[in-house]
């Protein structure tokens, strides 16, 4: 059985929904953004809670295994490519190609299960990203910090950024010598969530993949889709070039 699951993705691809589904099985880890080093984000809160020295990657990995692994020992990660860049800037990973493999090897699991999660409709992804950046509301919980406003140039910039982020993942896979075990697409995933979980359980080589998925706590993950009438208005404006 494999012990490390990595979701490689970019913002607004349904990764929080997938993470919640995976966590609900209690057998495939808890793939949060454990390496998000932006101010006040997951990494900083974790090293505080777990009393880990800032910048000590090996101590942090040990703490991740201790505090986040499911009973069968599986650890889950959700990574944006920029998280790898942050690790390099902090001196926790070496510069150069193959950062994803270097991280997996530091875990002691050079052969992890890798999920490449993308979204076909890049325009909707960019609009969702743009709105979240403006409002500060990245999930269904909490209130927006400020109102968003339509800005075509900003949406175009976010669209190009998201495409480049996806391209950087492709280059990272090649440099690390990995081919993703699963390529999941948001538009398909949202209608085939149980099937995706079964595929992940099989990739992890769990002893009873069907039973694991059947026994999951469906009520635990009730994330709502965030797109609303405002999103539809923005999509139509963008397409009309207004």
Image: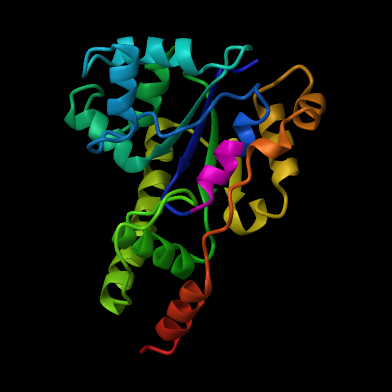
Quadrant for the C terminus in the image: bottom left
* 17 magenta-colored: yes
Where residue 136 appears, as percent x and y from the top left, is 32, 54
Residue nearer the viewer, 53 or 226: 226
| Residue pictured at 72% horizontal, 50% vertical | 192
Q: Is residue 93 above or below residue 198?
A: above
Where residue 5 appears, as percent x and y from the top left, is 54, 27
Q: In the displayed structure, does residue 70 sit left or right of residue 214?
A: left
Residue nearer the viewer, 141 or 158: 141
Residue nearer the viewer, 49 or 14: 49
Query: Most extreme residue toward the front, as rendered?
Result: 143
Q: Is residue 238 above or below residue 63?
A: below
Q: In the displayed structure, does residue 68 sit left or right of residue 207?
A: left
Give the color scheme: rainbow, by chain, secondary structure or one colour.
rainbow
Q: In the displayed structure, does residue 27 sit left or right of residue 131?
A: right
Q: Is residue 75 above or below residue 87?
A: above
Where residue 99 appears, as percent x and y from the top left, is 33, 30
Quadrant for the N terminus in the image: top right
| Residue pictured at 34% horizontal, 64% vertical | 130
Residue 109: in sight, yes or no?
Answer: no
Dividing the picture into quarters, in which one does residue 205 lie?
Answer: top right
Q: Exactly how many numbered labels are in the figure? A: 0
Q: In the displayed structure, does residue 195 sit left or right of residue 239?
A: right
| Residue pictured at 46% horizontal, 40% vertical | 8
Residue range highlighted in magenta: 13-20
Where residue 122 appears, as percent x and y from the top left, is 46, 65
| Residue pictured at 48% horizontal, 33% vertical | 178
Dividing the picture into quarters, in which one does residue 146 lie?
Answer: bottom left
């Amino acid at each position: 059985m494999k012990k490390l699951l990595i979701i490689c993705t970019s913002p607004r691809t349904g990764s929080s929904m997938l993470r919640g589904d995976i966590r609900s099985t209690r057998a495939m880890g808890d793939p949060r953004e454990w390496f998000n080093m932006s101010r006040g984000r997951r990494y900083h809160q974790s090293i505080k809670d777990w009393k880990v020295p800032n910048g000590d990657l090996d101590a942090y990995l040990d703490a991740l295994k201790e505090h986040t692994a499911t009973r069968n020992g599986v650890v889950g990660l959700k990574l944006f490519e920029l998280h790898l860049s942050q690790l390099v800037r902090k001196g926790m990973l070496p510069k150069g190609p193959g950062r994803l493999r270097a991280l997996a090897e530091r875990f002691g699991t050079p052969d992890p299960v890798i999920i490449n999660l993308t979204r076909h409709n890049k325009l909707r992804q960019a609009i969702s990203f743009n709105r979240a950046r403006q409002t500060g509301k990245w999930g269904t919980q909490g209130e927006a910090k400020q109102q968003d406003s339509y800005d075509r140039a900003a949406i175009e910039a976010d669209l190009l950024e998201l495409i480049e982020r996806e391209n950087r993942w492709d280059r990272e896979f090649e440099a690390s010598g990995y081919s993703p075990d699963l390529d999941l697409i948001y538009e398909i995933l949202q209608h085939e969530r149980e099937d995706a979980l079964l595929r992940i359980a099989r990739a992890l080589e769990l002893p009873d993949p069907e039973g694991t998925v059947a026994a999951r706590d469906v009520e635990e993950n009730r994330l709502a889709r965030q797109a609303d009438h405002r999103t539809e208005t923005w999509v139509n404006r963008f397409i009309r070039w207004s």
